[in-house]
Image: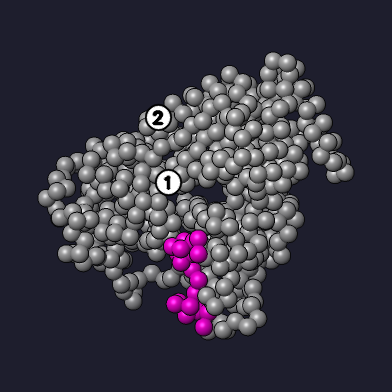
């Protein structure tokens, strides 16, 4: 991919929050300091609100890091839980052993006892609630009641709510007045302004290892800010695509044509998130198994040029290259990043994946997995077509398939049609995109645990149940594959994928068995990264 071309040692615009890339400007550092102060002051309830993709999760993680040691963190990431479920999650986070027969009064008594013990040991407890806008009124009331647990001088449990602006609307309800009155610190995270976008983009490039002058200038930053609404997650998505466009055309700097090539005209404010998640994946997927030189040869039919990292720096006047892509979009035809692949080009992704391990190499991790030579599909690919479907032949017709891109382009409508909350469908799309990012970097023989095919309608319950039982560290290693299905079925399918971070056969087997049990999946199979790539390519 483009890392070596730009002289980078890590991906500068990954979607997963990385504290090493934390941008302290644009009041971000001030927000974290305000939260630390409110907690140190003993505030019962603190609220952090902001639009989707504005950076709340990054702030949550940084706050968690800074509070560690002096505070015990209770993390609540499944906000659609019932009040009883919330109490059970708190018990689990506080290492309280339950028999399963406890009623609400019993749970509250156990929690209060544990909180008092920690208070006496000079350790305070803070509960961080993510996606708080999805909390029910009953759940919010339960959190308010938990905030009443206190000593003569201090609160035993402090709460920080991280949520979207819908949380503010919920708190306007008359029944929420007691909770709203307890919010002592109210912080709103704002999108980035054009100047801040420029600083943000170049800061991340520097952290990733870029050594030349600023890659993003004032003009390009203004365009990106206008297209993304200043939301960091959307900015990352667009910036990654722009770097790929520059790399594929062998240029040194961003030019107006690169904005056209990534489809700037299709972006508008908050919509950039969903569009950027899925647009241009074909370009990225084309480099899964290849080095940078073959990519350039396929795209342009010529030899690769010298990477930017090895070139003598040259300053290029952007305004002299081509007219502004936004103002003159109708005057210039959009160009494609990809040229037709010649017949003698390397084999397809599926064919590469089916070559298997070198002769004589024992595949310990995948014993029992059918090999390509057996002419059998992996077990995960043997899901039957739903009764009443148009048949396998029609399912393969591209225009009849419900693809992840179509789900993302109009996810609220598809969420309603598929019978899932729009926020959960967006979560699934994000897990799908994160897996693609992970596969770009992972080595071929890295083992992954892949669960059986399930209907998207089951995802909200399965995902929430799994998140409740995974530790904070393990939650970040859950991904998903969305499987296209014929549109007439009004359904879509997915698979959960987990990175076990071990190659020990016994450990892999144990983790697969546990995941199968936690998700009630039909099966849990260990596959290599190479095999998972092949499955995605077949889809």
Q: Position of residue 38 (x, y in %)?
A: 55, 23
Foreground mark, 2 or 1, reads 2
Task: Locate residue 127: give its quadrant.
Answer: top right
Nearest the camera: 175 or 148? 175
- Which residue is the extreme one toward the top? 153
Q: Which mark is residue 233?
A: 1
Please report the residue visible at 32 percent of the width from the left and 51 percent of the height from the top.
227
Horizontal side, residue 215 vs residue 432: left or right: left
Relative to 79, does residue 297 appear above or below in the rendering?
below
Relative to 328, does residue 395 appear above or below in the rendering?
below
Q: Which mark is residue 61?
A: none
Q: Position of residue 320 (x, y in %)?
A: 11, 50
Please report the residue visible at 37 percent of the width from the left and 57 percent of the height from the top.
291
Earlier in the chain: of badge 2 and badge 1, it is: 2
Q: Is residue 34 visible?
A: yes
Sort mark 2 into few (<14), some (14-19) or many (20+) by Cα contacts within 10 Å.
few
Please report the residue visible at 51 percent of the width from the left and 83 percent of the height from the top.
394
Magenta: main secondary structure equals helix
Distance of mark 2 from mark 1, alpha carbons?
A: 17 Å
Sort mark 1 into few (<14), some (14-19) or many (20+) by Cα contacts within 10 Å.
many
Relative to 390, does residue 27 appear above or below in the rendering?
above
> Which residue corresponds to mark 2?
27
Q: Position of residue 447 (x, y in %)?
A: 60, 54
Nearest the camera: 294 or 459? 459
Q: Are marks 2 and 1 in contact (CB under 8 Å)?
A: no
Nearest the camera: 123 or 244? 123
Range drawn in magenta: 394-413
Q: Secondary structure at mark 1?
A: helix
Q: Is residue 401 magenta?
A: yes
The colour scheme applied to this rendered structure is: one colour
């Amino acid at each position: 991919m483009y890392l070596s071309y730009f002289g980078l040692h890590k991906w500068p615009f990954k979607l997963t929050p990385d504290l090493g890339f934390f941008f302290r400007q644009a009041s971000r550092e001030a927000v974290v300091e305000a939260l630390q102060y409110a907690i140190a002051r003993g505030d019962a309830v603190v609220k952090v609100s902001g639009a989707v993709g504005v950076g709340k999760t990054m702030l949550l993680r940084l706050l968690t890091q800074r509070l560690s040691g002096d505070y015990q963190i209770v993390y609540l990431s499944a906000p659609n839980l019932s009040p009883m479920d919330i109490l059970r999650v708190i018990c689990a986070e506080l290492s309280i052993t339950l028999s399963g027969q406890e009623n609400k009064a019993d749970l509250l008594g156990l929690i209060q006892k544990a909180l008092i013990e920690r208070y006496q040991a000079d350790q305070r407890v803070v509960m961080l609630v993510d996606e708080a806008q999805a909390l029910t009124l009953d759940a919010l009331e339960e959190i308010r009641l938990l905030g009443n647990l206190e000593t003569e001088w201090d609160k035993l449990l402090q709460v920080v709510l991280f949520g979207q602006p819908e949380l503010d609307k919920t708190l306007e309800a008359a029944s929420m007045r007691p909770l709203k009155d307890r919010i002592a610190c109210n912080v709103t995270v704002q999108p980035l302004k054009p100047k801040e976008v420029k600083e943000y983009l170049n800061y991340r490039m520097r952290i990733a290892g870029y050594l030349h002058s600023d890659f993003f200038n004032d003009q390009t930053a203004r365009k990106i800010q206008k297209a993304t609404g200043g939301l960091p997650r959307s900015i990352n998505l667009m910036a990654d695509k722009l770097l790929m466009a520059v790399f594929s055309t062998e240029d040194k700097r961003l030019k107006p044509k690169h904005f056209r090539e990534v489809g700037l005209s299709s972006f508008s404010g908050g919509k950039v998130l969903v569009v950027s998640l899925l647009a241009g994946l074909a370009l990225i997927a084309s480099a899964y198994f290849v080095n940078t030189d073959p990519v350039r040869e396929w795209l342009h039919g010529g030899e690769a040029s010298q990477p930017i990292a090895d070139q003598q720096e040259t300053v290029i006047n952007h305004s002299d290259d081509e007219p502004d892509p936004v103002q003159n979009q109708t005057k210039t035809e959009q160009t494609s990043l990809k040229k037709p692949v010649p017949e003698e080009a390397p084999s397809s992704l599926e064919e590469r994946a089916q070559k298997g391990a070198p002769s004589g190499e024992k595949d310990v991790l995948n014993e029992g997995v059918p090999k390509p030579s057996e002419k059998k599909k992996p077990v995960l690919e043997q899901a039957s077509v739903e009764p009443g479907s148009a048949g396998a032949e029609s399912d393969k017709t591209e225009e009849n398939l419900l693809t992840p891109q179509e789900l993302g382009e109009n996810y609220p409508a598809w969420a309603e049609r598929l019978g899932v909350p729009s926020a959960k469908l967006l979560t699934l799309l994000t897990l799908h995109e994160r897996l693609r990012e992970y596969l770009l970097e992972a080595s071929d023989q890295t083992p992954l645990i892949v669960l059986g095919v399930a209907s998207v309608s089951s995802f909200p319950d399965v995902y929430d149940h799994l998140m409740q039982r995974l530790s904070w560290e393990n939650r970040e290693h859950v991904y998903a594959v969305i499987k296209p299905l014929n549109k007439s079925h009004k359904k879509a399918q997915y698979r959960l994928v987990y990175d076990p971070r071990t190659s020990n056969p016994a450990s892999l087997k144990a983790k697969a068995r546990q995941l199968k049990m936690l998700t009630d999946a039909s099966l849990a199979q260990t596959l290599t990264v190479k095999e998972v790539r092949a499955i995605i390519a077949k889809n």
